[in-house]
Image (tube, helix red, strand yellow):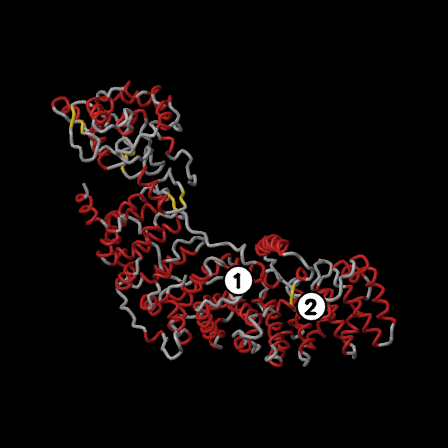
Amino acid sequence: MLQPELIQLLTVNDLVDTSIDTIPKLPVGFSPKGSLFCSFTSHNTEEGEKIPFTFTPHQILLHKDHEFFEDGDIQRHLYLQNLSTYSADDLPNARPCEFRCHISGCSQVFNCVEGYEHHYNTLHRHVCSSCQKSLPSTRLLDIHIQEWHDSLFSILAERQDMYQCLLEGCGLKFRTREQRKDHMINIHKYPSDFRFDKAMRTKKNKTARKNLLQKGTGMEESISKPEGSSYRPEEEESMELQPALDPAAYPADAVEMSTEIPSAPPLSVPIPLTTNQPRSQHNRGMQSHRVPRTVCFGQGSVQGFRGRGRRI
Amino acid sequence: MWRLNVVRHKAGRQGISLEELKFKKRAHEKELRQARRDSQLVSKRLLVNEDEDEEGGTMDTMASDQVLEYLQMITIDRDVVNKEAHLRALRKALRSPSAHLTFIKQQGSISVLVTNLSGPHPQCRLEAARCFHELSHSPHREVDPWRLRQATPYLITYLSGQSPKFTELCLYTLANMCPDSENVRELLLVQGVVPALTSCIQIHRYNLAVVEAVAFTFSQLVSANSASGEMIPAVLASGLIPHLLSALTPDPQFGLGPAIECAWCLHYLCCSNVDNGTLVAQGALLQCTSLLVTLGGAVAKGSVMEGLELLIWPLLRCVGNLLLSGPLGALQPHLKDSRLLAALIAFAQVFLRTHPALARESIWVLNNLTADSSVFSSAMLYLNLVPGLIQLLPFSEGINTMVLRVLGNIAHHGREYCVHLAQAGLLSALCATLKMADSEVVTFSLEVLGQLVASDTQLADEFIKQSGLPLLEAIQFNSQETIRIRATHLLEHHLTPLCLVDTSESP
């Protein structure tokens, strides 16, 4: 368990000089805290920002009754009361740390860093800033943004092939979404209800949730599935939820209008943007009334973080 | 090895199975924690006589009846031999706690025992003292040590005697009487318990059983909450400290017992913070640190004696608190051995599984050493101890926040220190701690990271290479404002230039 270096240090014979004076002292630079301060004081005057870094080294004096000492005191008194010798196997082990997703409103807890990373990469890595849809890859996110939030796209799509094949490295483009779908089914043998083609349509059913930073991320959950992975039949059931709220009923233009300003932050939903805005807003409003927040759309979205702070 | 064979709690008396003991221990531990919260955590120790184990226990009800009978016979019988036999019988009857109540309710019972304790017959004295010892250990509230106070002048007087067994008995009886009652402690102080104990440890300094008993008695006196008023100054002035310090080194034959008691006694003195300068001047810091280095060597060799933690614990606390008795520069002569740093890390790693709280206290000492000391911070880096420290970062319960404090202390000394910390692998470790659930850990990690990236742009680049940026970006969505502000600040002021390059590079 101990590193060999440490053992060697502690078991050297007495002839070796272990005096602290023999150790060269590194030059004490101007403290990094100072530079933090510097950058702050300069900003301080301009922006009135507060210094967020507060750490200063200090020694800690602990009183006899400090809670820090509790376990040791208990061990001592167990010993004094002759109960300590039987303790070997039921002592508390040091608990490894838990990890938590930082996205407020998500805050899911994990036992290992891998779990955390998988969660983060799946749900929060490729998120559309306009509609908070989470996608499994940069490519799919780019395609999603183009097709759903780029106002030029639909204009261009009328004149040329714009719908890219979703496969990484295919590169073919199609005039319509249906053509692409046929291509993906026939050539690439994708399932007819491939989630990341279809799921995108569902997004406008969602009301863009408010206030990304404070109230919650509103990052929409969707399952991560490696592209090209085989279709899993058990997911079909969750797809069945969709028809009642079939997104196809809402024309694509409604969405496009509402997101006309490319740099619109995610919280900008209520801001009227276009002449068509009332209609799209109406749609959104209706949806948000009709659909409880706890209902998730899209295949596999049940795997999102409905149970907040839940351990997995 | 264990003195527990002789000095033990009543629970040890009956033959109980291991399972039962485990269960009892767990329940007991819960009780102790509650008692500690109520500031009523006290322990008493019971000396068991050699002749006791062979004899079967008496029935409780019988014992109660017998007590009165014996008491009467002791007063009536003029023959010394008979008297002694009656006293011995009484002492055995007093082993059952219910007999204590009968005894204490009987008018004049204590006076009878005191008469025998102070009498001229050695055997009667011994048996009377044993009776008092049984009573001092009583589980009953009614058997208040204050009611036994008539015995204390004699018990204190006998401490200066030459008979080790009898002295030990008097010591444990006195020790059992003090924790429950403030009045008894005041009385003992007035009756001169402190100089008596000091002369006792001097007389019996080669008898480790007595040394242990003296140290235990002292620890009972100085661990009381009110002790810092008169008791501790009296103890500090008594010339006891050198004796405690010389008894700190464990004896290979006798075991750890005496050293453990001396160390706890010192701990109670140190954390009262009455006059830690005197303790340092008398060599407490030097002795504790050199013993820790020795124990660190033992631990490194893999020879962890059973119960070693009971000695390491108070030593760590002494050192930790004594480090605040003056500026670290002034304490330097007492902290010569650089192996102390290695020993502290070795303790933390070895006891991490069995006693995480000990690991935490070990790092606490490291914090008190490295705070504002470039000498110890340099030594941490020079001796390459930081990787060992980083290994402790995945552990919760206050361990990792304390580790982060130490790392912050080192980083605080400037660029050179930060660069060395990064070389030891701190940046990737921070990438992990930044994801942790404990918001205190995240805050401390951001603080340390802030020091690193602000000290040198290369470290900022390095952090970005370890894919730290998305991490900080994620933290900007944290629910706590203080955490968000720190992350945003780092992104805006220290990680900006490459951040732009980075995004433009990635497709």
Image quadrant occupied by the N terminus of chain B: bottom right
Tell me the subunit letter for badge 1.
Answer: A
Which of pointers 1 and 2 indicates the residue nearer the eye?
A: 2
Q: Name the residue under label 1.
A: A64
Q: Where is residue B472 in the image (x, y as percent from the top left)?
A: 29, 46
Q: Where is residue B231 in the image (x, y as percent from the top left)?
A: 59, 70
- Observer-nearest residue: B309 or B412? B309
Quarter location, residue B406: bottom left
**Pointers 1 and 2 in contact (C-beta within 8 Å):** no
Q: Is residue B66 left or right of residue B20?
A: right
Q: Dot 1 surroundings within 10 Å: few (below 14), some, or many (20 or more)?
A: many
Q: Is residue B116 left or right of residue A114?
A: right
Q: Residue at x 70, y 75 (%)?
A: B166
Quarter location, residue A296: top left
Q: Mark 2 points at which residue?
A: B48
- Observer-nearest residue: A88 or B472? A88
Residue B211, relative to residue A268: is it above or below? below
Q: What element carries label 1?
A: loop
Q: Position of residue A251 (x, y in %)?
A: 24, 19
